[in-house]
């Protein structure tokens, strides 16, 4: 066994860390307070090549392996949760199906500018009435005149209000449920495609989330992404493993930030004549966090390694996400207790970690839905 990152990966981590420290961290509070998408940062991260981290070099990407990409996501989440969410959306879901299934012409028109930071992309699964349960998708795509006509509304779409293109999950055959779902590329400017309300969010601010409306939107045949129709769910599971491990490493980063700040605070804050760091109950919080954090982070990288090795690892990726999310929710809670009343003050960062961490419970699959799947899988196991 080998638990070391390679020299190249260590070097890559330092480069990302430097960019995050220099470009994002001085702006973290501003992004959270204004809830505005930082377009200038987006362009800078594109120039550094990071928006094409998993795409082939011939389209302008860096084409790094899964583990290296996870290093990027972990470091990125040390900056701003909202910005990190927009970037990971673009890389992992916003452009994934286009890179995998788009025609060469679509790749040149959509993927290449997306990697350059000239276009923003997103994915649309969720609707008002259906989130976890994709079989409840009501957006329809009907074949007409050699193309497709899409009708429906999507909710909670990251970068929705500012996106230049999106990959939309729609049903081509409502009677088939999950087997009737397909992905379609829809670009800004297409007649009938518009943005609805922007959602005011608790956390992950700066990612600009909202509703997208499809009113008789006509797209050509080649905008159906992948073989199909009917393979949308199958294709989703192919990328979900990476999304879940990415979410796990986001959780590790937020937890670590919260507890490192709390450590500094505990050393300085005095109560009853000595720093609160001297009290055993406060020390226990750090000890418990340290153990959980190490376990969650190690397991997340193990899951990333399993993806890279091409192993069957859907349950490990779910476990990694569940473990790290729970660890993070507990860490931000404990860290805010250490801050005492000051955890309630907007000038301290604890309230932001506390708010941002809540998203982890839903992104990449709701906690209870993962528990259902994992519990059933565990019960099927022979040993
Ligand atoms: C900040 C943010 C950004 C987002 N960005 C996007 C985006 O870009 N694109 C997109 O498509 N979506 C996006 N979403 C939506 C997100 O994917 C959904 O919130 C998520 O899929 C859960 O769906 P839901 O909110 O409808 O909850 P529901 O599915 O309605 O679940 C509600 C509750 O019921 C539980 N539950 C559901 N089914 C079961 C079950 N079988 N067993 C036990 N419990 C169950 C859930 O765990 C949860 O606790 C975003 C959400 C947020 C908060």
Image (spheres, rainbow, N blue to C red):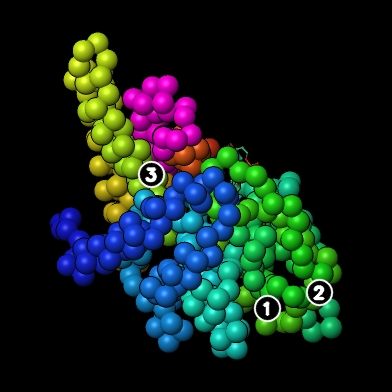
In this rendering, position of residue 226 left or right of residue 191: left
Label 1 secondary element: helix
Spatial separation of the CA atoms under disc 3 and disc 2: 41 Å
Between 96 and 265, which is closer to the camera in this rendering?
265
Between 224 and 199, which is closer to the camera in this rendering?
199
User: Residue at label 2?
Assistant: 191
The stretch in magenta equals 322-349
* On-image quarter of the C terminus: top left
* On-image quarter of the N terminus: bottom left
Which disc number belongs to residue 170?
A: none
User: Is label 3 in contact with label 2 (beta carbons under 8 Å)?
Assistant: no
Q: Residue furthest top?
A: 272
Residue depth check, mark 3 versus mark 1: number of the one nearer the observer? 3
Label 3 secondary element: helix
State the image coordinates of residue 118 (x, y, percent, origin top left): 55, 76
Between 374 and 104, which is closer to the camera in this rendering?
104
User: Residue at label 1?
Assistant: 223
User: Residue at label 3?
Assistant: 254
Task: Tell me if residue 304 can be seen.
Answer: no
Residue at the image position 74 percent from the left and 61 percent from the top:
195
The stretch drawn in magenta includes residue 340: yes
State the image coordinates of residue 164 (x, y, percent, origin top left): 64, 71
The stretch drawn in magenta includes residue 168: no
Residue at the image position 21 percent from the left and 70 percent from the top:
8
């Amino acid at each position: 066994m080998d638990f070391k990152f390679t020299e190249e990966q260590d070097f890559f981590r330092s480069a990302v860390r430097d960019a995050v420290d220099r470009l994002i961290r001085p702006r973290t509070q501003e992004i959270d307070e204004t809830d505005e998408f930082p377009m200038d940062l987006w362009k800078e991260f594109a120039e550094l090549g990071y928006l094409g981290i998993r795409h082939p070099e011939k389209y302008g990407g860096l084409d790094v392996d899964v583990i290296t990409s996870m290093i990027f996501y972990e470091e990125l989440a040390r900056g701003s949760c909202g910005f990190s969410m927009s970037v990971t959306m673009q890389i992992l879901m916003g452009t994934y199906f286009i890179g995998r299934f788009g025609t060469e012409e679509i790749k040149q028109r959509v993927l290449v500018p997306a990697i350059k930071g000239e276009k923003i992309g997103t994915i649309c699964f969720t609707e008002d009435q259906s989130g976890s349960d994709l079989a409840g998708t009501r957006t329809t795509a009907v074949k007409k005149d050699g193309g497709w006509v899409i009708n429906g509304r999507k909710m909670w779409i990251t970068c929705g209000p500012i996106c230049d293109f999106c990959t939309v999950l729609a049903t081509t055959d409502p009677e088939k449920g999950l087997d009737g779902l397909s992905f379609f590329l829809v670009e800004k400017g297409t007649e009938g495609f518009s943005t609805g309300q922007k959602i005011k969010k608790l956390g992950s601010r700066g990612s600009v989330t909202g509703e997208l409306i499809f009113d008789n939107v006509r797209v050509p045949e080649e905008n159906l992404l992948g073989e199909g129709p009917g393979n949308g769910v199958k294709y989703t599971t192919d990328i979900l493993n990476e999304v879940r491990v990415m979410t796990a490493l986001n959780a590790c980063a937020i937890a670590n930030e919260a507890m490192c700040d709390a450590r500094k605070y505990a050393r300085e804050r005095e109560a009853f004549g000595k720093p609160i760091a001297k009290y055993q109950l406060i020390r226990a919080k750090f000890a418990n966090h340290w153990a959980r954090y190490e376990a969650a982070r190690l397991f997340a990288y193990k899951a990333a390694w399993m993806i890279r090795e091409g192993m069957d690892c859907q349950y490990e990726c779910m476990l990694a996400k569940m473990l790290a999310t729970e660890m993070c929710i507990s860490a931000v809670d404990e860290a805010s207790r250490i801050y005492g009343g000051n955890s309630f003050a907007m000038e301290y960062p604890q309230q932001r970690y506390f708010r941002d961490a809540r998203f982890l419970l839903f992104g990449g699959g709701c906690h209870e839905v993962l528990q259902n799947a994992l519990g059933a899988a565990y019960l099927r196991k022979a040993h």
